[in-house]
C-alpha cells in the first residue's frame, strides 16, 4: 500500500502526521488544523494540481495554505537540478521579482512551466472559492505588487498581508494562519 492509498483508506490518519514527502515533489505539513502543501515543483502539471487539491478537499482540514513555487536556495539539490537544466536566464521554470543575474541568495522560485502562463489562476480556479484555502497571489510586477496585495485578501504571505498586519496591530496573537482563519469566520 503506498502513502496516498494509506490516507485515502483512512484520511483521519493525517492528523497523526507532521510532515509527509510525496514522490511528486510536494510537501504536506499539518499543524493542528492547518494543512500546507507546495505546488509547482518539477514535473507538476494541471492534472497533478487538480488531483492534489481534490485530495486535500476530501481530507477536510479547517484551513489550507496553497503556496505556489519551490524556493531555490544555493547549494541545494533543487539548485543543482535547475542549473543542470541550462541557462538560468532563459529557464521558463524560474520566477523572480528582481533585475540582473539569477541569484539564489535572492527570492528565486521554481514553478513548473507545464502549469502554463497563469499558474496562480489555475490553482484559484481549482480551489473554486473554498474559504478554507489561502490561495496563491496572482503574479504581478514589482510596481504592481503593493496595489495587488492591498486588494487581494486571499494572499497568505504573512509579511505583506495588510489584513494580518492590522489584526496583529490590534492585539491578535498566534499563528498567522489561525489569525486569518478567525478573521474569515467573523
Image: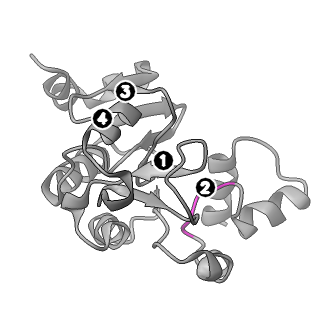
Q: Is residue 97 magenta?
A: no
Q: Residue 174: x, y in percent?
A: 76, 41
Q: Secondary structure at mark 4?
A: helix
Question: Viewer-proximal residue, 49 or 69?
Answer: 69
Question: Viewer-proximal residue, 129 or 152?
Answer: 152
Q: Secondary structure at mark 3?
A: helix
Q: Residue 155: x, y in percent?
A: 56, 65
Which residue does the image show at 47% across and 32% down from the upper left? 30
Mark 3 vs mark 2: give the one in front. Answer: 3
Magenta stretch: dominant secondary structure? loop
Which numbered disc covers residue 39? none
Q: Secondary structure at mark 1?
A: loop
Q: Residue 66: x, y in percent?
A: 43, 52
Residue 14 quadrant: top left
The residue pinned by badge 1 equals 62
- Could you classify mark 2 by the number of other residues whose Cα lies within 10 Å: few (under 14), some (14-19), or many (20 or more)? some
Whether tag 1 and tag 2 are in contact, CB under 8 A, the answer is yes
Whether tag 4 and tag 3 are in contact, CB under 8 A, the answer is yes
Quadrant, the C terminus: bottom right
Amino acid at each position: 500500500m503506498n502513502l496516498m492509498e494509506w490516507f485515502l483508506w483512512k484520511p483521519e490518519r493525517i492528523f497523526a502526521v507532521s510532515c509527509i514527502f510525496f514522490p511528486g515533489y510536494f510537501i504536506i505539513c499539518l499543524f493542528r488544523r492547518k494543512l500546507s502543501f507546495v505546488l509547482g515543483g518539477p514535473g507538476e502539471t494541471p492534472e497533478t494540481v487538480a488531483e492534489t487539491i481534490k485530495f486535500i478537499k476530501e481530507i477536510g482540514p479547517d484551513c489550507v495554505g496553497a503556496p505556489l513555487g519551490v524556493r531555490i536556495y544555493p547549494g541545494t539539490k533543487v539548485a543543482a537540478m535547475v542549473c543542470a537544466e541550462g541557462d538560468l536566464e532563459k529557464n521558463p521554470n524560474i520566477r523572480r521579482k528582481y533585475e540582473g543575474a539569477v541569484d539564489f541568495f535572492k527570492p528565486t522560485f521554481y514553478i513548473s512551466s507545464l502549469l502554463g502562463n497563469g499558474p496562480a489562476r489555475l490553482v484559484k480556479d481549482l480551489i473554486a472559492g473554498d474559504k478554507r484555502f489561502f490561495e496563491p497571489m496572482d503574479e504581478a510586477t514589482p510596481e504592481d505588487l503593493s496595489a495587488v496585495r492591498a486588494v487581494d485578501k486571499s494572499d497568505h504571505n504573512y509579511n505583506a498581508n495588510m489584513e494580518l498586519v492590522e489584526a496583529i496591530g490590534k492585539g491578535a496573537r498566534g499563528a498567522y494562519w489561525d489569525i486569518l482563519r478567525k478573521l474569515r469566520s467573523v
